[in-house]
Amino acid sequence: MSIVIFGDLFSFPEGSAATNRVHTYAKGFYENGINVHVICFANEYNTSGDGQFNGIHYYHPFGQNTRSKYFILRRWQKFTKYIKTIALFRKINKEDKIAAINCWTQMTLTQIFAFFLAKLNGSKIVIEISEHPLRYYQGSFFNKMHGKLRLLIEIKLCDGILCISQYLVDFYKSKNVNTSKLFLIPSTVDPSRFIQTGENPFPFRYIGYFGGLTFYRDNIDLLIKAFVEINRTHSEVHLVLGGFCSDKEREQLTDLISQLGIGNKIELLGYISREKIINYITHSDVLVMVRSNDMTSQASFPSKLAEFLATSKPVVSVNVGEISDFLTDNLNAFLVEPGNINALTERINFVLDNYEFAQQVGAKGKELTNTIFNYDFQAKRMIDFIT
């Protein structure tokens, strides 16, 4: 029996937060006796090709390294991607029956194609919902109608829905989805990845943030402004920022840092590979999770928060969405209300001033990554749900 993780929201083996979640699913399935195939369906130009990573087979049916200058050829390449994918599914299904397709997409065409593949191979289709399905369909009447149509198709063409939050479970219930099709899978992490090894990348203590480096969604400007005050009482501590951002967002970041006059105390790493970033995370003295309080945050659960907890380091997090359903302030993390610079400053200063106690809280946070957030624990639940 095999499970295919298929979609256009992730790359593999390197990628974003979605890629990290795919890794935990795939590893959990594989270690529980299920063969796993990861198919990256996005039209991404890459050099990784197809391969195998820790027993997990992965494929890029688009298969292009460079973008052609010819429009007709680009259309042909996108069309043949579908033909290659059909052939790939037939081959996998022939060698090892596909029990289910775990589909990750926000595109209606990809959703319909995944449904076609499931029917063609006699497989179930279970969709992954880690964000609010209507977050990109706000504003105009026509945009909202488009979102409702896409949602209807998504619901009708699946056998099950994996939801990252209770918010999403309740949302789909409100759309009259049968509760037997809904399954709650919170953030998942492989804690064995976050054991501190190697040398400290910096010769100083530092507060670490690793994730999206955006102002709107991730509120990274909140942390930078709070750090200005933190630096007044803890001048020996630096701030290290690692993650993806566009050129425009990076310019915003550097402008803000320059305006505040703290460029000599902030290390802006940018994007680092999935494996290399671990060394920066695990050597942090304090890990901070900031996020805005909007529709997206209410519906989702940040994967980086579970990763931070896995390090056993003190974690300071804004309390958005369902974070307080799992974490308790001063017990297994330090929670602050979103958007409050003063509260964020106070909590980070408290952690630095009371570091022995903060380490005890960090150890309690790590316990959650051996249970509720653990990839193996959740993989067993997903396999039961699918079968």
Image (cartoon, helix red, strand yellow):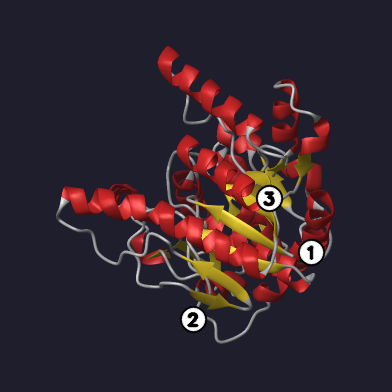
Q: Position of residue 365 (x, y in %)?
A: 78, 60
Q: Which mark is residue 203?
A: 2
Chain-order first, disc 2 or disc 1: 2
Q: Residues within 10 Å of mark 2 (few under 14, many from 20)?
A: few
Q: CA distance from mark 3 to mark 2?
A: 57 Å
Q: Which mark is residue 357?
A: 1
Q: CA distance from mark 3 to mark 1?
A: 55 Å
Against 242, residue 290 (above or below) is above
Q: Residues within 10 Å of mark 1 (few under 14, many from 20)?
A: some
Query: Residue 348 occupies which quadrant of the picture?
Result: bottom right
Q: Which residue is mark 3?
A: 122
Pick the residue in front: 350 or 19. 19
Q: Residues within 10 Å of mark 3 (few under 14, many from 20)?
A: some
Chain-order first, disc 3 or disc 1: 3
Q: Position of residue 234 (x, y in %)?
A: 54, 63
Mark 1 and mark 2 in contact (Cβ < 8 Å)?
no
Q: CA distance from mark 2 to mark 1?
A: 24 Å
Q: Position of residue 21 (x, y in %)?
A: 62, 58
Pick the residue in front: 384 or 13. 384
Q: Which mark is residue 73?
A: none
Question: At numbered mark 1, what does the secondary structure look like: helix, strand or loop?
Answer: helix
- Which of discs 3 and 1 lies nearer the camera? The answer is 3
Against 15, residue 185 (above or below) is above
Query: Residue 89 occupies which quadrant of the picture?
Result: bottom right
Amino acid residing under circle 1: Phe
Against 321, residue 76 (above or below) is below
Q: Position of residue 207 (x, y in %)?
A: 55, 63
